[in-house]
Image (cartoon, grey):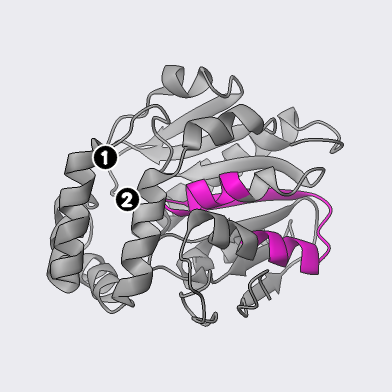
Amino acid sequence: MSTDGVQIRCAVTGAGEPTLVFVHCWTGDRGFWDAQVARFAPAHRVVTLDLAGHGESGRNRRAWTIAAFADDVRAVVERLDLPRVILIGHSMGGPVILEAARGLPGRVAGLIPVDTLRNVEERWPPAQMDGVLAGFRADFAGSASRFMRERLFAPSTDARLVERLVARAVAASPDMAIAAIESTWRYDSAAAFREVRAPIVAINTDLQPTDVAANRRHAPQFEAAIMKGVGHYPMLEAPERFNEYLADAVARVMARSEPLAGRQ
């Protein structure tokens, strides 16, 4: 249960430290990580969860914010009493794991953002953001479909996967989905980067550029590997190849992680 009383559904598989905690994207669910659970559970305890308003978790929430979603992650880590975790977050899950790490001192061995946090200094111009959000409020299904089709897929993305992901998104509660995406876009990732001391090893795609230098101005420990030829959902589009990137990222985090004491 999260701090506001919302029930959070999670699944625990495997054994071995550190525990890998997977956080899905906007309008996703823990099933997005099935191929990663199968790959990594033989060597690690693997935890997947549905954020509030997603999958099988509760929907009785008033504020759909990054801070509230981060509370979902913290609640799971604390309820399971996980002493050493690597937080892995896709898209919206990137800001979520950043915020969660701020509230889990002494537990976070590292963070692995997936196709997110490409440039923490880059912020949407307010007028442009407000225009996109106005479109979402006027016609959520149509605007969300256009937004995803125009921005999130590569030419190589399987058409059936595109349709499945778009259908999932437009079926989400508009109130939750719009508030969640607005909070994601307004989240101050640069400030969070300056607080997090644990290794950050991103796996980003080449759909949009990643500015490593900009990110290192706020978190000198930031690293990124670029996975080419896929869209915004590499764990679904090319799961076996993504798993190789993830195995490398986990190894890099573990090699650089210090004993967990104090602020992470």
Circle 1 sits in a helix, a strand or a loop, which is it? Answer: loop
Q: Position of residue 168 (x, y in %)?
A: 30, 75
Determine the residue positioned at 12% across, 69% down.
142
Please rate how many residues cluster around mark 1, counting C-alpha atoms within 10 Å: few if below 14, some from 14 to 19, many from 20.
some
Location of residue 155 with respect to 206 vertically, above or below:
below
Q: Is residue 250 magenta?
A: no
Give the extent of the magenta segment.
73-99
Q: Is residue 254 above or below residue 107?
A: above
Q: Position of residue 9 (x, y in %)?
A: 61, 78
Q: Work out whether residue 144 can be spotted.
A: no
Mark 2, residue position: 232
Residue at 48% x, 66% y: name it: 63
Between 46 and 135, the one lying in front of the other is 135
Residue 2 found in image quarter: bottom right
What residue do we see at 27% from left, 37% from top? 124
Name the residue beneath numbered marker 1: 207
Where residue 246 sits: x, y (%)? 55, 45
In the rendered structure, which amino acid carries the disc numbered 1?
Answer: Leu
As drawn, 256 above or below 53: above
Q: Position of residue 100 (x, y in %)?
A: 63, 51
The image quadrant of residue 4 is: bottom right
- Report the Cα–Cα distance between label 1 and label 2: 7 Å
Q: Is residue 140 left or right of residue 252?
A: left
Q: Tell me the crowding category of disc 2: few under 14, some 14 to 19, or many 20 or more residues within 10 angstroms, Cα based.
A: many
Which label number is shown at residue 23?
none
Q: Nearer the viewer, residue 204 or 118?
A: 118
Give the SS element for disc 2.
loop
Q: Is residue 84 magenta?
A: yes
Q: Which of these two is toward me, 23 or 238? A: 23
Image quadrant holding the C terminus, namely: top right
